[in-house]
Amino acid sequence: MRELILQMMVSVDGMTEGPGENLDWVDVVDPDLDSYLAELLDSVDAQIFGRASYELLGQYWPDAERNPATPGDEMLAPKVNGLPKIVVSRQEAELAWLPATRIGNNLASEVDALKKQPGRPLILFAGATTAREFMRLDLIDEYRLLVFPVLLGGGRSLFAEDGYRRHLQLIQTVPFAKSGVVLHRYRQQPA
């Protein structure tokens, strides 16, 4: 059975975006962080996005492959663009950033079916709302949090008060010295 990994960039205070949907705090140049992300993308069969994240990233990555702004973009863009994208949306949506398919009519059963297929893990690069829904439905096997050295003091929290509790086991911590970002990897423990 394939595992599902949640990969999120968060601030020290647990925000996935700052006030006003601000994301400038994730714009760091760190070759080691880029290498980690490249290895992660090489280790999975598909990426899962919420609809809004899919649309936002779909405006960026195709052009980044043609005109990379950084060496990291040059390395990551072909990987991000080439991997299948699974878009979580309850409504039919135009999926222009290909290859892409949509799920969301019955998220728990659709993800369960995806996990039962043979292959490598699936990576959830979602927005906070979609990530929280995956957490609520207990669909995540591993949490990978890239914690950026910034306190945003507001914005959108990954860990909203949804009334769920999960016991996690820390399996790895990796500091990226140039940017100050720290990767925390956790496995979900059985209830």
Image (cartoon, rainbow, N blue to C red):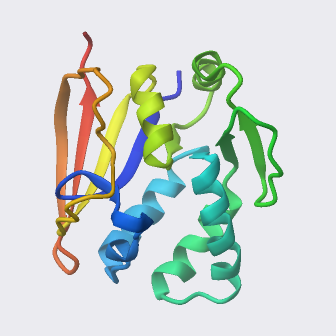
Q: Residue 59 placed where, x, y %?
A: 68, 71
At a point 63% along the width and 81% down the height, the residue shown is 64
Q: Residue 123 placed where, x, y %?
A: 50, 44
Above or below residue 179? Residue 10 is: above
Q: Quadrant of residue 179?
A: bottom left
Above or below residue 142? Residue 137 is: above
In the rendered structure, the answer to whether residue 95 lies left or right of residue 116 reads: right
- Which of the pair 51/171 is nearer the observer? 51
In the rendered structure, the answer to whether residue 42 lies left or right of residue 188 reads: right
Above or below residue 92? Residue 100 is: below
Q: Residue 138 placed where, x, y %?
A: 41, 20
- Which of the pair 184/58 is nearer the observer? 58
At a point 17% along the width and 30% down the height, the residue shown is 169
At a point 60% along the width and 72% down the height, the residue shown is 77
In the rendered structure, the answer to whether residue 86 lies left or right of residue 126 reads: right
At a point 47% along the width and 65% down the height, the residue shown is 38
- Which of the pair 51/29 is nearer the observer? 51
- Which of the pair 13/60 is nearer the observer? 13
Q: Residue 24 placed where, x, y %?
A: 38, 77
The image shows a total of numbered marks equal to 0
The quadrant of the image that shows the C terminus is top left
Furthest residue to the front?
A: 20
